[in-house]
Amino acid sequence: MGVAALVGCNNSGNAPTDTPTSGKISISVDESFQPIIETQVSTFEGIYKYADITANYRPEGQVVKDLLNDSTRIAVLSRELTPEEKEVFDKKQLVPRYTKIAIDAIAIIVNRNNPDSLLTLEQLRNVFDGKVKSWQQLNGKSNLKDITIVFDNNNSSTARYVKDSLTTNHTLPQNTFASDSHKALIDYVTQNENALGVIGVNWISDLDDTTAIGFQKRIKVVGISTDPAPLSTESYYQPYQAYIAQGKYPLLRYLYIISTEGRTGLGTGFAAYVAGDKGQRIILKSGLVPATMPVRVVGLN
């Protein structure tokens, strides 16, 4: 009887089975950040042999749904939850915890044959508002025709960022299209001279990653100026790490790990790792700006 009682007690089905450094969980990740999170997960699992993290890479809208319907307790997003989304957790008596892990940027890319790789922020707003529809409106000497705006996904965080930050009516013009993936987006811009692509910078920023290097060789990254009438090319900034850290590149956003774990589990341990010294060094290497580690900016004369 004593043995039977002991076995029954140890198999009480709902008992937590994970700790901050062991166990098995699934997390939901904005697919814009797949390169950096893949590296973080593989490194974490390499250090903690009994940790098993399955990362599901999805459009931002689906990641939020996963969090709201309890499909996951850990999400990686480039925004905080809205008041309406927070209400869902209020009813469940859960308090989402935010761990800021990086400063990210949105990159604007064009075909390598496009001579217009410098745009002002005002010009970019006019393109996304639909006021400017052709390259000739931006440059009277251009031989290119109508602009085709391309995102990775209609429901992506990059599309949401542009609608929220770079448009007047939070809608995108009719010359906007979505590709099936980040690779498909790069392919389209490579093959179409009129294309203007919008992509998360971590897909092209890691100079030690062969995929990122391959992507960079196929496209141009646009330099952006906040000055409506720049006097020189020195007023334009690309999404390089130093310019992101200094705030000179204008299309910035923060990256968060959001946890609804009611206890200190594997998700909490992973968030602490990414925000800690080793995780922040991985972010630094990737070309993004760590949230908690100072970035040394070196000036070259």
Image: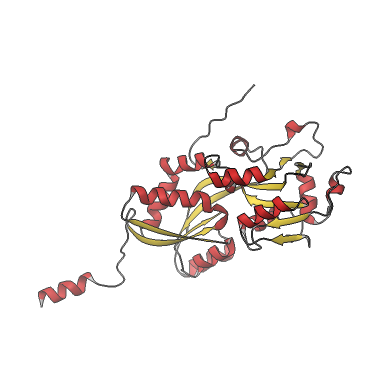
Residue 3 visible: yes
Residue situated in front as seen by the camera: 148 or 166: 148
User: In the rendered view, does 83 fall on the left or right side of 148?
Assistant: left
Q: Please tell me which residue is depicted at 44% across the width and 67% down the height of the picture.
A: 93
Q: Toward which corner of the image does residue 183 lie, by quadrant?
A: bottom right
Horizontal and vertical percent for residue 96? 47, 59
Residue situated in front as seen by the camera: 3 or 178: 178
Horizontal and vertical percent for residue 162? 69, 54
Q: How many marks overall?
A: 0
Q: Please tell me which residue is depicted at 31% across the width and 71% down the height of the picture.
A: 14
Looking at the image, residue 289 lies above or below residue 158: above
Residue 79 visible: no
User: In the rendered view, does 223 fall on the left or right side of 14?
Assistant: right
Q: Please tell me which residue is depicted at 53% across the width and 34% down the height of the picture.
A: 295
Colouring of the image: secondary structure
Residue situated in front as seen by the camera: 112 or 263: 112
Horizontal and vertical percent for residue 127? 79, 52
